[in-house]
Image (cartoon, helix red, strand yellow):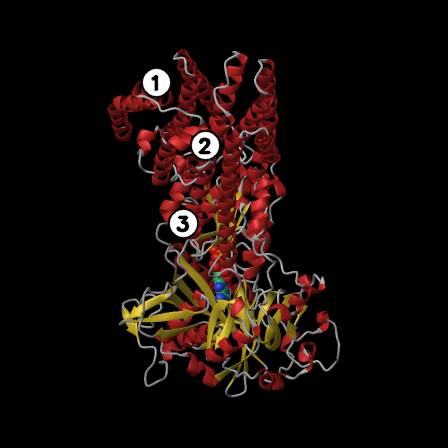
């Protein structure tokens, strides 16, 4: 049946789908949703828990360990066998929990980046999750949207779709609304249909939903692109490589320990078990999972600060960013426009009022203009009236007074006695609607008099928008609004004191001067023009509408910078990151805003799209290196800028919203899409989405990206140093022909403490305050770079030697069980002290506050208590073959495992006053 939709005329569709031109009623939509289910493709079946649990045992070492346990059970060593099994099981549970958390965060991400749809319900257009769309819904689609369901189009305006995901056809397909009588024509030929999963390349349209979810054509072939790509990050890949080297190294050492032990006459099964336990303890098998958790927790944190990461590797790359290329409007500025000044009929007019509230006077100098007298514009205001009316006709925005506010105030709303003016549509156009309302012209007024017959939507390449209207008297008129230069180059006449006169060079100069004056006060300037067409004109598609225009005037609107952006730009500068403004706006406006935000100060730092076009490749590279503002650029320039920056070795984060921005966003190392104003296509091309469209959020995300990488380094340092210590003590003991310092179960126990809670708690360490005061790290940097490898060796050696020394001390006391207990406790406690040292690479723990990571404190206290239980609770004594320790033993253990921490603390307190004096001195100089 669904194959026949393209054959029906529009009229028949309404009846067939039982829907009205005002859309479905909410209740009816809910009923349909319950009946047909959500509009999404069925997900893959989740892997059952038991499978995931079994997958934890896929590790070779664990399997050998299990085999060795079976051997020891066969030899009657039941306690060993059961204990090792329990520890292995606990390890598996830990792994499972870690994996589950990582998966949960990824699933949450998927939900957050789910597409939205613009649906008309109860006579009102709303944005809602695409999954809630039902058959019969009336849906609007615009350039950049992904079509949410299969639609039979009922209204199109230059609508063209990219249907390549469905048909493989890469050229955009132009759409129409007429019923196509033929039966069985291919999907590619069904020109009055828009299919789910395809995307809008240009224009706009409305259609009725005829199929959702698995019933759509895309559902049939069920190959929608996954919203979140799951791939290993470069760091994860590099760690896997490091892991392999460590495994090889560990295995050699373990084999040596086993061989020496056997040679010294130790029992075979015990040595096998020791070898394998040592391997399990020494190999940082928890590392990949903890890295994923740290990344996933980081992602969660970023979500809370409004940055939605779509691809996990982006978290890492964020820390390496050297240039942030940002759009101006809406990202650096608030995108809440208010017209402040007009240039009409050769004179400048100021406009009062704030926000979207349609109240405000027009001033010629200090004299107030009355825009209407007895319902009509006075003679000297005719030019103004004409221009404002044109701006309102060439416009799709709406403002309306919303009911009593509940809860939070919306961003684009102004308060009016407890009520708020809400904008529906593009803020640039909203500002013009408000301007018209201030002049007493409403949409109803103009719609009574004019009927729109055609629209060429705004496009950031053309930088203008055009409509054709039929007047009540039958005339045909074109209205165009857009960038000043664009319209001036298309205009031949100008309107002045009610007359249309030729546009000469002198007048052009005057207009440009007025434009520059507005732009240099950071106003965004829009020009408006019109043209009369012969009323008999039939073929509107056949003529160039945007030519022979009559220039009507300029509107300068204020778009204040977003709060906090200037500070964020300064933070970037300190962090060695360049901020570059890339805007479609006029160079003078762009520079004025850039100055306010400290992005640029001199006009030499501004490069325009036209200048880029006229440059040789070498010059482009040179210009890109020096410019901080790119103005009047098209999305294609944006792509060139990203490429050039990357060629120059930069790691680039680039924002984008419109459909044409998608290639640049995809090309950047971190492509950033706007959550509110961004199109689906750009979001899909991006690696991060800003829920609040705010530049500050990018900087916060970079900061968090750096912090996450720092945290990963912290627990790599911790895990590797501890493991080195463990291997070393066993190895040295066997070299020195001493008994085994640790039994297999004891080794596994230490491993559980190390890889467990304290390491995970390092993953949630707060960002280092110095994190944004150093240059970005190179993405090619090794995980062990910047002294980490050295530190691991140093501390690992220290740990191995002191544990051996304590063991030797215990042996001298004449009791092997006591010596082992002391060695075990030294090793464990060293790790619990050392974890504090790993909290920061730049400052001693006393500087960052002992208690500032409460998870870590909890993990350490819990681990210490568990260790005490191992020593003092009789049942554990039997299992782990430990003996209770006395005060004298404790003193030795604590001195060797944690004495150094006390010493660094003392050193810190002694030096503190000196440091404070030096800082004071630095501040004053
Ligand atoms: P950014 O790229 O920083 O977001 P922008 O929003 O000014 O800046 P575009 O949206 O590409 O960039 O707009 C470029 C120019 O096109 C604007 O300076 C303005 O002159 C014109 N323009 C913007 N919006 C409209 C519109 N709705 N109708 C007509 N012209 C517009």
Q: In this figure, which residue is indicated by the disc labeled 2?
A: 754
Disc 2: CA contacts within 10 A as few (<14), some (14-19) or many (>=20): many
Give how far across and how far down residue 155 sits, in percent: 59, 77
Q: In this figure, which residue is indicated by the disc labeled 1?
A: 892
Give me the residue at 31% from left, 36% from top: 851
Q: Is residue 691 above or below residue 649?
A: below
Give how far across and how far down residue 138 sits, in percent: 54, 76
Q: Nearer the viewer, residue 104 or 588?
A: 104
- Which marked residue is nearer to the observer: mark 2 or mark 3? 2
Q: Secondary structure at mark 2?
A: helix
Disc 1: CA contacts within 10 A as few (<14), some (14-19) or many (>=20): some
Separation of residues labelled 1 and 3 (CA atoms): 52 Å
Q: Is residue 42 above or below residue 109?
A: below
Give me the residue at 31% from left, 67% from top: 353
If you read the primary sequence from the N terminus, does the residue marked by circle 2 or circle 1 appear first? 2
Q: Secondary structure at mark 1?
A: helix
If you read the primary sequence from the N terminus, does the residue marked by circle 1 or circle 3 appear first? 3
Q: Nearer the viewer, residue 394 or 578?
A: 578
Give me the residue at 35% from left, 28% from top: 844
- Are dots 2 and 1 in contact, CB under 8 Å? no
Disc 3: CA contacts within 10 A as few (<14), some (14-19) or many (>=20): many
Say whether residue 15 is left or right of residue 329: right
- Which marked residue is nearer to the observer: mark 1 or mark 3? 1
- Are dots 1 and 3 in contact, CB under 8 Å? no
Say whether residue 462 is left or right of residue 397: right
Q: Residue furthest bottom?
A: 473
Say whether residue 594 is left or right of residue 658: left
């Amino acid at each position: 049946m669904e194959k026949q939709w393209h054959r029906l005329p529009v009229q028949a569709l309404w009846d067939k789908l039982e829907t009205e031109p005002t859309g479905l009623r909410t209740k009816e939509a809910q009923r349909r949703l319950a009946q047909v289910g959500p509009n999404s493709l069925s997900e893959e079946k989740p892997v059952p828990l038991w499978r995931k649990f079994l997958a934890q045992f896929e590790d070779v070492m664990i399997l050998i360990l299990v085999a060795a346990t079976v051997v020891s059970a066969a030899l009657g060593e039941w306690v060993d066998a059961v204990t090792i099994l329990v520890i292995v099981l606990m390890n598996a549970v830990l792994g499972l929990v870690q994996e589950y958390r990582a998966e949960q965060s990824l699933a949450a991400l998927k939900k957050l980046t789910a597409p939205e749809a613009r649906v008309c319900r109860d006579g009102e257009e709303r944005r809602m999750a695409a999954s809630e769309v039902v058959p019969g819904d009336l849906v609007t689609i615009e350039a950049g949207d992904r079509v949410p369901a299969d639609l039979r189009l009922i209204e199109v305006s230059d609508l063209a779709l990219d249907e390549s995901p469905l048909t493989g056809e890469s050229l955009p397909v132009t759409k129409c609304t007429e019923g196509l009588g033929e039966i069985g024509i291919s999907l590619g030929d069904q020109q009055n249909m828009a299919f789910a999963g395809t995307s809008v390349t240009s224009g706009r349209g409305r259609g009725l939903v005829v199929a959702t979810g698995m019933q759509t054509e895309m559902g049939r072939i069920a190959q929608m692109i996954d919203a979140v790509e799951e791939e290993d990050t470069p760091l994860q890949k590099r760690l896997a490589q490091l892991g392999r080297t460590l495994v090889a190294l560990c295995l050699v050492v373990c084999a040596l320990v086993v061989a020496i032990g056997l040679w010294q006459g130790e029992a075979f099964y015990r040595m096998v078990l020791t070898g394998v336990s040592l391997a399990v303890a020494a190999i940082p098998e928890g590392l990949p999972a903890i890295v994923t958790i740290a990344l996933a927790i980081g992602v969660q944190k970023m979500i809370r600060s409004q940055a939605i990461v779509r691809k996990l590797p982006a978290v890492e790359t964020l820390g390496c960013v050297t240039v942030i290329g940002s759009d101006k409007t809406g990202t650096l500025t608030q995108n809440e426009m208010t017209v402040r000044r007009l240039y009409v009929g050769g004179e400048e007019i100021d406009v009062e009022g704030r926000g979207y509230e349609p109240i405000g006077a027009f001033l010629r100098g200090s004299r107030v203009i009355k825009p209407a007298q007895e319902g009509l514009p006075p003679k000297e205001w005719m030019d103004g009236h004409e221009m404002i009316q044109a701006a309102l006709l060439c416009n799709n925005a709406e403002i309306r007074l919303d009911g009593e506010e509940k809860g939070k105030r919306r961003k684009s709303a102004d308060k009016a006695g407890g009520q708020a003016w809400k904008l529906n549509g593009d803020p640039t156009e909203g500002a013009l609607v408000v301007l018209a309302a201030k002049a007493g012209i409403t949409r109803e007024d103009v719609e009574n008099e004019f009927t729109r017959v055609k629209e060429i939507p705004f496009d950031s390449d053309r930088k203008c928008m055009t409509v054709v209207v039929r007047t009540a008297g039958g005339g045909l008129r074109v209205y165009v609004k857009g960038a000043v230069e664009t319209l001036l180059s298309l205009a031949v006449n100008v309107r002045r004191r009610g007359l249309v006169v030729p546009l000469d060079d002198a007048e052009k100069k005057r207009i440009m001067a007025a434009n520059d004056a507005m732009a240099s006060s950071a106003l965004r300037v829009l020009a408006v023009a019109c043209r009369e067409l012969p009323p008999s004109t039939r073929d509107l598609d056949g003529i160039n509408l945007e030519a022979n225009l009559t220039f009507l005037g300029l509107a300068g609107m204020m778009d204040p910078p977003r709060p906090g952006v200037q500070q964020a730009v300064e933070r970037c500068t300190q962090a060695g990151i360049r901020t570059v403004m890339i805007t479609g706006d006029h160079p003078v406006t762009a520079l004025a805003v850039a100055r306010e935000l400290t992005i640029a100060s001199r006009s030499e730092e501004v490069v325009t799209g036209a200048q880029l076009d006229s440059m040789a490749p070498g010059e482009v590279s040179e210009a890109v290196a020096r410019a901080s503002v790119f103005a009047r650029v098209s999305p294609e320039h944006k792509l060139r800028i990203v490429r050039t920056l990357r060629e120059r070795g930069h790691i680039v984060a680039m924002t984008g919203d419109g459909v044409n921005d998608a290639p640049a966003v995809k090309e950047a190392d971190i492509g950033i899409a706007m959550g509110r104003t961004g199109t689906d296509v750009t979001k899909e091309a991006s690696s991060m989405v800003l829920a609040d469209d705010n530049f500050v959020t990018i900087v916060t995300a970079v900061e968090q990206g750096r912090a996450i990488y720092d945290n990963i380094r912290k627990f790599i340092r911790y895990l590797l140093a501890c493991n080195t210590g463990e291997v070393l003590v066993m190895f040295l003991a066997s070299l020195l022909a001493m008994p085994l310092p640790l039994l297999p179960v004891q080794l596994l126990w230490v491993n559980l403490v190390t890889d467990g809670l304290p390491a995970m708690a390092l993953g949630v360490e707060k960002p280092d305050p110095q994190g944004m005061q150093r240059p970005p790290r190179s993405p090619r940097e090794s995980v062990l770079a910047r002294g980490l490898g050295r530190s691991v060796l140093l501390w690992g050696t220290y740990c191995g030697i002191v544990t051996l020394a304590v063991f030797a001390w215990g042996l001298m006391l004449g009791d092997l069980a006591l010596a082992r207990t002391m060695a075990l406790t030294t090793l464990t406690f060293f790790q619990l002290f050392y974890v504090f040292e790993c909290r920061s690479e730049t400052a001693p723990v006393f500087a960052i506050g002992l208690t500032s990571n409460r998870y870590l404190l909890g993990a350490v206290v819990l681990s210490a208590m568990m260790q005490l239980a191992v020593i003092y609770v009789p049942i554990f004594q039997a299992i782990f073959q430990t003996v209770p320790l006395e005060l004298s033993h404790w003193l030795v253990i604590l001195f060797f495992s944690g004495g150094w921490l006390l010493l660094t603390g003392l050193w810190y307190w002694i030096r503190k006053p000196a440091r404070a004096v030096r800082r004071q001195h630095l501040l004053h100089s």
